Image (cartoon, grey):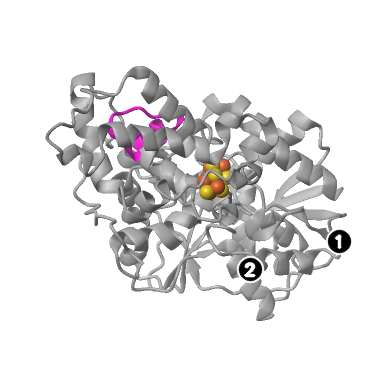
Amino acid sequence: MIENNKQIDASDQPGKPPGSEVIAPDRQMGCLRRAVEDNLSRKIQAMLNSCVNCGLCAESCHYYCSTGDSEVIPANKAAKLARVLDTHFHPVKARLPFFRPAEQLDEQTIAALHKAAYEDCTLCAKCALTCPMGINTGEILSLARAMLCSIGHLPSGLVHPVETAFEVGNYLGLTTEDFVENIEWIAEELADEIEDESFTIPIDKPNAELLYIPHPLEARDLPFLLMYALKILHAAGEDYTVSSYDFDTVNYAYYQGSKANMMRIAQRVLDAREKLQAKSIGLAPCGHGYRVLRWEVEKYLGKRLDFPPVKSIVELIEGYLRQGRIRVEKDKFEGPITYHDPCNIARRGGIIEAPRNVLNAVTSNLVEMHPNRARNFCCGGGGGLASSGDFGKIRVTAGRKKAEQIRETGARIVATNCFNCMTQIRDLSKEYDLGIEVKSIVELVSESLIMQAGS
Ligand code: SF4
Ligand code: SF4
């Protein structure tokens, strides 16, 4: 359902992305007011007014579970924004003749809001499942992010990637020439590996069944990860292509809180499909990239996209296994293996059983964390924290709960389906001496593939 979300013309945003420049104090209130008008939905208003202070949300938030600090209890973080809205932007009070809002937000208030929204919440939405009133503090704090973005008060790690995506078309600044060159190199390597000289990776093939959007980090620095995915697509006999116009699943504008920036980056993926007339879109393992393209884009456009819902690679793999298009050797990796549900893939994305079906095909020793599935704890790397060098200490501190969950499984391998989660869990393994390997579910499948003649 679309309610209260203003529709955005993503093509009408020339130049630097909003949020890149710090707004002078005397102009801040106007920007903040517009951000409130554009982003304060009835749903958020209702949530802000529904808290009964029961405190149940505390135990669902990995920040509180890891630190015991009452400051980071979800209700207390949401209260910071509620106070600002009440004193400066109250929709009813602001119309009263005797209401005199402060001229501007003081620096201390802005800093407190920044900490609550960008540092102390990963937008994981676990609190919403616990709260008897259904309050999603992450959604509430997204409004705080939108406000802070409107005055250029962003974490540095969320500025440059979005600017680069605007300028070059992907957050790493990889040129089309470099991407194509890397893909051709990957094709040669894969041809050697599968002993098929005729093997190629289709680039810009029109009318394919599937447009596969990789993570640009794979294309630039971690080609073996892209190889795993492409080997699976090839083995399944998928009619796919990659695009030289867009090769970026990532959308850090979503974490900025700017819908306009998010839509402009997402639009490039949609345009790539349109240009090639591909039937559908498949995405590399990326939690927030999936969240944006599967759910947020339709929500903010206010309409269904006119092609089948985008799929994460893990859903594609599950389909191939179910249809007998690929076969895998079981237990090539010594277990036990556990699966970390990325928040944007499971709780906020709806992909819950597919990864388990895939993992049960490659291992007879899948062990679950507790809680798991939609109720799994965030690893601490979401919300843009893993993408920003500034937040390393906060991430690993808030990730202690996840580290405990992992240790309790006794797993040797943690599989997941998101780049940021992999980065974060590797950091947790170092910090808490977990002695685990962190692997993409795509790697586990690709390395277990039984290549058939002709595939
Ligand atoms: S959305 Fe997640 S990180 Fe944010 S307050 Fe709720 S449980 Fe904590
Ligand atoms: S669980 Fe919900 S109602 Fe209870 S304190 Fe937290 S946000 Fe408020």
- Label 1 element class: loop
Write down the residue under mark 1. 365
Majority SS type along the magenta span = helix
Residue at 69% across / 40% down in the picture?
425
Q: Nearer the viewer, residue 44 or 333?
A: 44
- Number of disc labels: 2
Q: Say if disc 2 is inside 8 Å of ligand 1.
A: no
Nearer-the-camera pick, 319 or 4: 4
Query: Residue 270: horizontal and vertical position, in percent?
Result: 35, 61
Part of the protein shown in magenta: 146-163
Quadrant the C terminus occupies: bottom right
Q: Is residue 156 magenta?
A: yes
Q: Secondary structure at mark 2?
A: helix
Kind of residue sitting beneath label 1: Asn
Q: Residues within 10 Å of mark 2 (few under 14, many from 20)?
A: many
- For the residues marked 1 and 2, what is the alpha-carbon distance in whole angstroms? 19 Å
Q: Which residue is mark 2?
A: 317
Q: Please state which amino acid type lies under the numbered disc 2.
A: Ile
Residue 144 appears in the picture as rendered: yes
Q: Height in image: 116 above or below 10?
A: above
Q: Quadrant of ligand 1?
A: top right
Using the image, determine if residue 243 lies above or below residue 265: below
Q: Within 10 angstroms of label 1, few (less than 14), some, or many (20 or more) residues?
A: some
Looking at the image, which residue is at 50% across and 56% down?
134
Relative to residue 447, is residue 393 depicted above or below? above
- Residue mark closest to the camera, 1 vs 2: 1
